[in-house]
Image (spheres, rainbow, N blue to C red):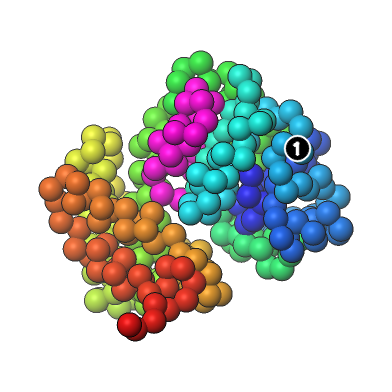
Amino acid sequence: MGSGGVGGYFGARLQQAGHSVAFIARGRHLQALQRNGLALKSPLGDVQLKVKAVEKPADAGAVDVVIFTVKLWDTESAAAQLRPIVGGDTFVIPFQNGVESIDCLKKILSEKAIMGGAAYIASRIAEPGVIVQTGQMARLRFGPVFELQRKAAELFLGACREAKIDAELVDDIVRVLWEKFVLLVALSATTTVTRKPIGVVRSDPDMRWLLEATMRETWEVGRKRGVALPDDFVARTLAFVDGLPPEVKASMLGDLEAGGRLEAPWLSGAVARMARELGMEAAANRAVHAALKPYLNGSEVKAS
């Protein structure tokens, strides 16, 4: 559900391994998938596939697992469209940014159908019907929210491994989501506000301060909410960022450069909101969200 950079990539790998996959898309991307198939260009191997692409989930037929990868602002409307195909034996795994997808989906679909997941990949729709991956990382981590989901999670893990996807079944999916959130908030905040890749950000003392500040605030909010984030997690995450290729930038910067909508309200904006609810201050993330507000809907706010 959402056949862009994340869903398109992992869906293609699963189909390449012989699994039956339906790609739910819309607009020019859907038309290209139906007409020409899906082209994947990746350092891990290119592939051209004839695919089943539909606009309405109901046309996908019976499914075992929904890889849910729509942009965060489409979460509720996309989940509502899934109702016809999410039965008692169907599971939905959101591989989205942010840490609130599970709770959001539970409001619309059966909570026993919702697992948790985190995707680690740099990929995008380069043009309709064409997914391009940059870098070598293409990893999925997911896990059950209820113990009765474990068998289905294990089956999906097996399917991923058959597709040679770097996949891991985790016990504490909430902690995993927050671990990614700490990294993603900082990376998206700093590269988007500066309009520069991470190599520029981490090498300048002031920009590096912003990187660490947004990271530490997110870690502090997670800990306050009872998430078992380690004491040294910020230092470890900074060390990971220092090892990234210098040209890496967050997908949100790509959205900004393309004039598209931004996920900032669910990233730095969410940290500022959650901090406020806890009686805390997240000044760096609040400032980032404020700086990006004119661009949230893809165009600048006009002066009144």
- Residue at the left extreme? 279
Q: Quadrant of the C terminus?
A: bottom left
Query: Is 218 on the left or on the right of 11, as rendered?
Result: left
Q: In this view, does 157 lie above or below 270?
A: above
Q: Residue 129 location, x and y as percent?
A: 76, 61
Q: Locate residue 294: give its quadrant.
A: bottom left
Q: In this view, does 167 lie above or below 4?
A: above
Q: Can residue 186 be seen in this view?
A: yes
Query: Is 20 on the left or on the right of 66, as rendered?
Result: right
Q: Which residue is drawn at 71% across and 68% down?
A: 127
Q: Residue at x 42, y 73 (%)?
A: 295
Q: Is residue 199 visible?
A: no
Span of residues in magenta = 97-119
Q: Locate residue 84: give its quadrant.
A: top right
Q: Residue 154 location, x and y as percent?
A: 59, 24
Query: Is 123 on the left or on the right of 202, as rendered?
Result: right
- Residue at the front extreme? 304
- Neighbourhood count class around disc 1 (C-alpha, 10 Å): few under 14, some 14–19, many 20 upward: some
Residue picked out by circle 1: 60
Q: Of the residues shown, which amino acid type is indicated by label 1?
A: Ala
Q: Residue 14 location, x and y as percent?
A: 72, 40
Q: Residue 297 location, x and y as percent?
A: 46, 68
Label 1 secondary element: helix
Q: In which quarter of the image is the N terminus?
A: top right
Q: Which residue is drawn at 70% across and 30% down?
A: 63
Front one among 74 and 257: 74
Q: In this view, does 55 lie above or below 152?
A: below
- Residue at the top extreme? 148
Q: Is residue 109 magenta?
A: yes
